[in-house]
Image (spheres, rainbow, N blue to C red):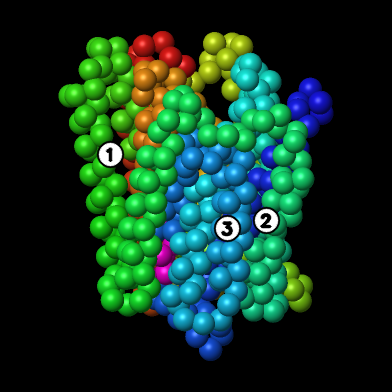
Amino acid sequence: MLGGHPRALSTLFFTEMWERFTFYGMRALLVLFLVDAIDSGGYGLDDKTATAIYGLYTAAVFMAALPGGWVADRLIGAQRAVMVGGTLMTLGNLMLTIPGPKELFFGGLVVIILGVGLLKPNVSTLVADLYPEGGGRRDAGFTIFYMGINLGAFIGPLIAGWLAQRYGWRVGFLAAAIGLPFGLLQFWLSRHLFNGAGAQPNRNDGGAGLAGDWKRFSIALVVFALVAALLFSGVVHLDPARLARGAAYVLVGMGFLYFLYLFVGAGLDPVERRRMIVVLVMFLAVASFWSGYEQAGSSLNLFAKRHIDRMVGGFEIPAGWFQSVQPAFVIVFAPLFSVLWVRLAQRNLDPAAPLKFAFGLLLMGLGFLFMVVAANMVVGGANAPAYLLVLTYLLTVFGELCVSPVGLSTVTKLAPARLVGQMMGVWFLGSSLGKLMAGLIAGTFDPNDLAAMPGRYLDIVFYACGIGAVLLLLSPRITRLMGGVR
């Protein structure tokens, strides 16, 4: 035991730290690489196409967690899912380092998505398995684990961003790729510490349906491979921007149909139905929040590259380094927010979840006011100072700390016991929709029309603060619909 926690927690801490090192190290470079000129090593894509690809990628990562959890639960167990997922992530990132046709690079992104879908949800499941008694010790364990997530997200862009600027994009991608194998090696050597947790599928049929599940999985895998082959061979051509818009409609349609089922065909009693209204509100709110927050990897990343004064003495700060600012702020301020909520609860002043969501949207929206100021400086012919971008990230992180740690916990509390797993899917669906919308919003920024840029950022201020203000006004009524759940 380490500080009252199982030794296996340190294994999972470092596994997730290295996974996030790899994920965020690559993420910091993705859009910058896609839009960079061909003679500079990039692909020379326009901003609209590049940010649509970014949105599709980040949305798909979230959605892949759903089948990834199923594969672990039904087929191979969480431990093997982590190992297979990490191996796929490493392979996918290595594919990004190989100069060649775009199809190879985009194939690497698809492999990374599959890897994250297997690793990400199941390493969190293993953390929960370390604390079968639940309670405060599990919460403390997840807090330590959450710090590992943000530590990796902080370090990855610093190393990958500097190497990409100094030695080229492919070296930066290689730096991201080499992080995760360290975590996988430690995980494999320390697997005995889990005392069998996650070693086998979590089935309640004694394995009777295992063959059928493998058959269904194999069919799905063949269909996926055929679709991928048609796309990457050029037989079927898809425009990323149109695909992103189509995917957004599909996700909205999925959400509409599911909530229609909940209210009409799920057999909910009146209390449960009122609570599902709250879940619907939170679904819309979280999608709106991530659509602004995820500008960090797209429009704000491009702004840092093109319009921020990055010179400090004789050193030019790599644009990718700004991707480390948000996780650094999370590491610093997450414990303070945790203490704040506890102190407020002791005085019966802890805001209900709808009110925290309202605060999160308002803070995120207000953060973009600094980008309006920065964009106006650019229109005037000057580069903007870096502190304006940093202040934007600071307020968006304050918003994140009001939304992200609160949302999933509250949704699972509101859900009837028979629908908890589906509610996790709803949360992932809302987050995925928001990240997809972020890419589409970023695509509206035209690098050849700088005069329109302040207005684009002001639009984010208006819609985020507008939704936040409406939620603020309605929060007393929404809280009553929760039926005592906090």
Q: Quadrant of residue 342?
A: top right
Q: Residue at x 32, y 64 (%)?
A: 227
Q: Amino acid at mark 3?
A: Met
Q: Residue at x 64, y 30 (%)?
A: 197
Q: Is residue 223 magenta?
A: no
Mark nearest the camera among 3 and 1 is 3
In this orientation, does residue 180 appear?
yes
- Do the residues under discs 3 and 2 have CB atoms within 8 angstroms? yes
Q: Is residue 52 magenta?
A: yes
Left or right of 242: which side holds 28?
A: right
Determine crowd level at label 1: few under 14, some 14-19, many 20+ residues with C-alpha closer than 10 A. some
Q: Secondary structure at mark 3?
A: helix
| Residue 255, label in figure | 1
The one nearer the camera, 272 or 444, is: 272
Q: Amino acid at mark 2?
A: Leu
The residue at which mark 3 appears reads as 89
Q: CA distance from mark 3 to mark 2?
A: 8 Å
Magenta segment, which residues? 48-55
Determine crowd level at label 2: few under 14, some 14-19, many 20+ residues with C-alpha closer than 10 A. many
Q: Secondary structure at mark 2?
A: helix
Relative image position of residue 117 (x, y in whole percent) = 49, 48
Q: Amino acid at mark 1?
A: Gly
In this orientation, does residue 411 appear?
no
**Upstream in sequence: badge 1 or badge 2:** 2
* 480 is higher (above) or lower (below) than 221: above
Q: What secondary structure prevails in the magenta region?
A: helix
